[in-house]
Amino acid sequence: MRIISLASTVLFLLSFSTFANAEQHDFEALKNKYYADHPGKGKYADLWEPIPIQQYWNPVTFYKPPQTLKAEVKAADCVTCHKGITPGWVHAWQDSTHANLDEIRNLSSSDSRHYKKAKLEEIEAGLQKRGVLKKGQKLSEVGCIDCHAGVGKKSMKHHVDLRMPDRAACGECHVQEFAEAEAEKAQKWPQDQWSEGHPSHAMDWKANVETGIWAGMSQREVAQGCDMCHYQQNKCDGCHTRHTFSAAEARKPEACATCHNGVDHNEFEGYMYSKHGVIYETSGKADWDFEVQLKDAITKGGYTAPTCAWCHFEFNGEFSHNLVRKVRWAFNPTPAIADNLDHPWFEERKVAWIGTCSNCHSPRFSKAWLDTADKGTIQGLEVEQEAKKIVQKLYDDGLMVGQKTNRPAPPAPEKDAPGAFFGLFWAKGNNPSFVDRTHAEMWEHDLIKHYKGLFHVNPGGFTYSEGWARLMRRYTEIQDANTRIREMDALKKQVKALSK
Amino acid sequence: MRIISLASTVLFLLSFSTFANAEQHDFEALKNKYYADHPGKGKYADLWEPIPIQQYWNPVTFYKPPQTLKAEVKAADCVTCHKGITPGWVHAWQDSTHANLDEIRNLSSSDSRHYKKAKLEEIEAGLQKRGVLKKGQKLSEVGCIDCHAGVGKKSMKHHVDLRMPDRAACGECHVQEFAEAEAEKAQKWPQDQWSEGHPSHAMDWKANVETGIWAGMSQREVAQGCDMCHYQQNKCDGCHTRHTFSAAEARKPEACATCHNGVDHNEFEGYMYSKHGVIYETSGKADWDFEVQLKDAITKGGYTAPTCAWCHFEFNGEFSHNLVRKVRWAFNPTPAIADNLDHPWFEERKVAWIGTCSNCHSPRFSKAWLDTADKGTIQGLEVEQEAKKIVQKLYDDGLMVGQKTNRPAPPAPEKDAPGAFFGLFWAKGNNPSFVDRTHAEMWEHDLIKHYKGLFHVNPGGFTYSEGWARLMRRYTEIQDANTRIREMDALKKQVKALSK
Amino acid sequence: MRIISLASTVLFLLSFSTFANAEQHDFEALKNKYYADHPGKGKYADLWEPIPIQQYWNPVTFYKPPQTLKAEVKAADCVTCHKGITPGWVHAWQDSTHANLDEIRNLSSSDSRHYKKAKLEEIEAGLQKRGVLKKGQKLSEVGCIDCHAGVGKKSMKHHVDLRMPDRAACGECHVQEFAEAEAEKAQKWPQDQWSEGHPSHAMDWKANVETGIWAGMSQREVAQGCDMCHYQQNKCDGCHTRHTFSAAEARKPEACATCHNGVDHNEFEGYMYSKHGVIYETSGKADWDFEVQLKDAITKGGYTAPTCAWCHFEFNGEFSHNLVRKVRWAFNPTPAIADNLDHPWFEERKVAWIGTCSNCHSPRFSKAWLDTADKGTIQGLEVEQEAKKIVQKLYDDGLMVGQKTNRPAPPAPEKDAPGAFFGLFWAKGNNPSFVDRTHAEMWEHDLIKHYKGLFHVNPGGFTYSEGWARLMRRYTEIQDANTRIREMDALKKQVKALSK
């Protein structure tokens, strides 16, 4: 069994590598596919209109240059003007790698950033090959205009040509990373637990705009809050904040925190309270070298515990911007996953995880822990599924509080259902009822936090603070409400009978 | 419109500067006003008595020197004795600027603390002018006795003269900062949304002791917990912790965290999860120079994101300890603010905010975001206001659970009301009922966190973890309870009719 | 009174010191007692079976070497092989003190780790005395085999001899620390508020496995989550993470965070939001020297605020791994403690605390604060006790929701009771009901967080975010449910009477 798994893993890896290598040198094909795949406003486009801020979350579809400066500007003008208008941009860029390419070229081999020298040469070779640079030409810097109008541009019409860089803009130079990140779209689930390419950073904007309640709710300023994380499909600055665009920043756990925290997936908190996070806090912040590449983190960077990036970029010993290659429970424990963990697709990924953990734990410990986390997750799922039946029955019996008197339909394209996702973000009259909402939180918050706590090894997280103990509470609330509702219904019927 | 706004802003600034400059050189006037404005025990003074710990939160009104040492002590005696008794004080002070003034005098111009040299000279000039120092005399150090008895004292009666430094004590030297901080009291709201000077650090003790439930509750040890933040009116060590009194400390976001966190205004968490906070964590902690003044933070300090102090001290490009000059929603979104955002008072402040954000974002982006945050806040307010009507109606109909049988009045000076603030800190019998409490949390916790999440750019904070999604939950709970209560009431009436 | 207290404190200290000194040189006696005291599976051993991961949490009882490598391996082989298999271990160890004893021997007296030189000599002297080392023999390193098979071993049968180090394994060299930590077991409560030795790290595994619901629940993968903190009795790597085993790590507050956070005892959050934690964040992380011993923290380490370890290791000016010597409320405010705080046992400990705080606060301030915290804790306890009576009465009256129709017994050895602990981790049908669960959270979460917030000086924590304001909410929920349940019961009786 293990041998078969490993063999197919190897085959998979080979096919992936071929794929990745083939793509990495064809920027034009990558770019065309990137735009072809982009959903724009998505399938519910008729239901919503963008508000001004959204042009920054999805410049691909919405960005329009400002009309305040109707002029042709030269590359050097950007800094001259913006030093006064928006000094923060300029100073951040001036301290960045982009503004200091000569420093990179002169790095000694003992410098932990030395790998950037080769990367710069590779990028220049690519640009030369594609004719953006002349043969032998070097980049003097990556200036404002290169990203905001096009690599190598000398001038631009500010009111016409200005663009907010999308993934493809960064990909003009960073072809390898662009290819890796876009490769997430190739993910296929064995029993269609998720549709192709989901869940992933590479399709998170599509996932966002094609969520019914997001498209249907009238409070667009609240709805765009979702976009503020669900824009990785559109841009790279979610992890490499403009205008520093630091790799070291993105290697630190906090870089993931803005999106990966909170009631519905508390990965950051889980990590930080785990021993892994504690080691990062007590040793990593002061002593580890985040300038080294992830592949050298343990040997040269001094890491004595993993980070978000280290585990999730890694796959069978190699590191890439494709983060979905070891995904299994994928944000949402469901019977469709729980019942199929013995499928080779899932088993191979578990083997890959054992490999990851085995960098610092014995393979036996690693497997024992992953087995524990799987079984613990299923135990949580069972509680949620039992509660779900009670909620469904109340709905089927027409007994949800207010169901017959005051339960308006949710906004289109949503349709009414018990314990539905929409009830977390929309409410009117008795839709959702308390029981609906409680069940929605059970599967969308507590069960997910339970499993995230298990897999991120945060003991208090999955036992008492969140996870299991919260699932128990929701179950109690639903059972309690169910009993009270049915007792009231019975009493009403008795009174009705008496009134006749 | 914009032109008018800017013009009046300029006028406002001019008048403010004059005011500030006038005051900054008149310490005696400032001090007299400080004490004249101080409320002492406040308007509910008859209702409560201080407990011993409160002499430290409000030394202005309550502090009495200990009678353990009845002796005249010399300046040098302090360290000699306290090195043994309370070594932490002594060591913290010995490493502080106060104990090392000569080091300040010898700072090279390349040192980021160089500005302190001029500040020291300015302070000494002021003290000389006021006769505390002789002409040309320098401070040798700022020792224990200078703050705990009076600047320049040579000895003191420990049991008579010992004082805990209040704002005026710090202001003896730091006249400029004292004047800036006290200037908060001049804040006037255009339609009396808040009374004069509120909300502000400069009047937070008054706000505290004149809160009905604070004064009325019998658990004084719990009540004094409020004082532990609401003492900025009394002392400066809330931000510049004794006995280091570091400016750099107060420039770091954590300095604000003790008070600005939690269920009713989670500014710190909002910031830390925002991209701003993430940059502080990933770059700021290791690389920024917090010794530089805020005005040089971007250019010399290496800041690539804002901190609490940077945004809230700034006003039209200048930095001051008056933090209320850009306040708009002021802790508490209400219709009185929401309906008047087009008033010049609010518009000017929004223009000032656009200026703040434009240090690192385009003015168009800045305006788009602030518009989004305003509208999103109003959307949250609408949900809360709809729930409020339901709660009020239940109360008016006498249908709150236990309302007719077991709802004692709150302690004086509070008066009973539905969904009132007192219900967060006091409960007896069925006052508050679940519905009261739920509504109190809605306006006092969730709506505030919603708006704080928006303005501190914490997407998960205002969409799903707190804010909007919590408002939806409370709304659901109130609607659900309302329906159940009214169905029960109807059934009771039917049964009563049948019983006749 | 104070004099009596101090006198008995001195006597207590003398007896303790004698005890500790006697033990510290008799490793064999310590080890034998350690194993004799160890509960193994505990008194409910018949009710549960360990799952594979638990051999790592309790190697004392469950660990079996893997059978993958059936061979005799030499000391040098460990690193050779594991460098490839589990590189994280090897690199962490290579950077640790254990791998660099010569560096320790050559530390200059100005190095903050200089104290380790004497410690190493003391350890070697002990090993020589016990014949583990020859007279005059030095340790060349502490390698894998020394901990995983026995100090000084040259080779081992990997499949037979491999062990996971328990407390006694570390104690072979670190006899002093082992003795200190085990001394916690001698703790006796004056009125049996807790049984002997509890609560403590030294008996936390026993406390865990002898908790009814832990032993009785069927979800073993969830239950083992408790073990992940409750294993300090078994191992030392809860604070000194393998394979760095750093003292500096354990001196940082985050080292305690994995276990001391969350809904039922949020010490870490409380500390971090207190001014103490803020100073640690703003000054400590960058400037303090965590390599110095705790006793030199203020004088040489530059500490300007306390850490977890600093306060809890300290007792009357000395520092030790016995953390229970100042325990008073002990995780769980109950009347049995509240009513006996004037007992000398409690008073002496309070005096010791005043001494601790007086390192940085005046004794008067320290006492005023501790008095405030005691009284505030009792105020919270009173609210909980009032609610408890309501819950008990509902149960006695058979009126808990579903009590007569759908309240299954909890799994053995638990027995049914209102508001019981088991309801946080187990639920079936209407057991627990909402009211049970609410009361369980009141005493097990909110009251504890109230008192932890008070004693860790986190004002928002005990006033509004947790603690008092949450106790008010739970009280409100219980009163509200009680009124609704009793009104429903009365109505049912009326209808029943009408139906006759």
Image (spheres, coloured by chain):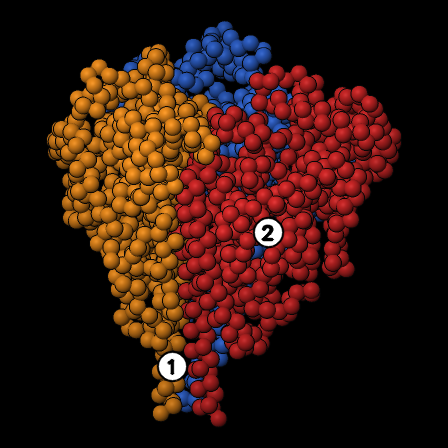
Chain colours: A orange, B red, C blue
Judging from the image, what secondary structure is the residue with disc 2 in?
helix
- Measuring from the top left, give residue C90's x and y in whole percent: 35, 20
Q: Residue furthest front?
A: A71
Image side of residue A365 versus residue C25, left or right:
left
Q: How many marks?
A: 2
Q: Nearer the viewer, residue B432 or A487?
A: B432
Specify the subunit that label 1 lies on: A
Residue A124 % position (x, y) = 24, 20
Q: Is residue A421 above or below residue A364?
A: below
User: What is the three-letter code of the residue carrying label 2?
Assistant: Thr
- Residues C189 and C109: in front is C109
Q: State which mark lies toward you, 2 or 1.
A: 2
- The reply to whether discs 2 and 1 touch (Cβ–Cβ < 8 Å) is no
- Kind of residue indicated by mark 1: Lys
The residue labelled by disc 1 is A492
Q: Position of residue B168 (x, y in %)?
A: 75, 39
**Could you tell me which residue is drawn at 62 percent across and 22 percent down?**
B114
Subunit bearing disc 2? C
Circle 2 sits on which residue? Answer: C463
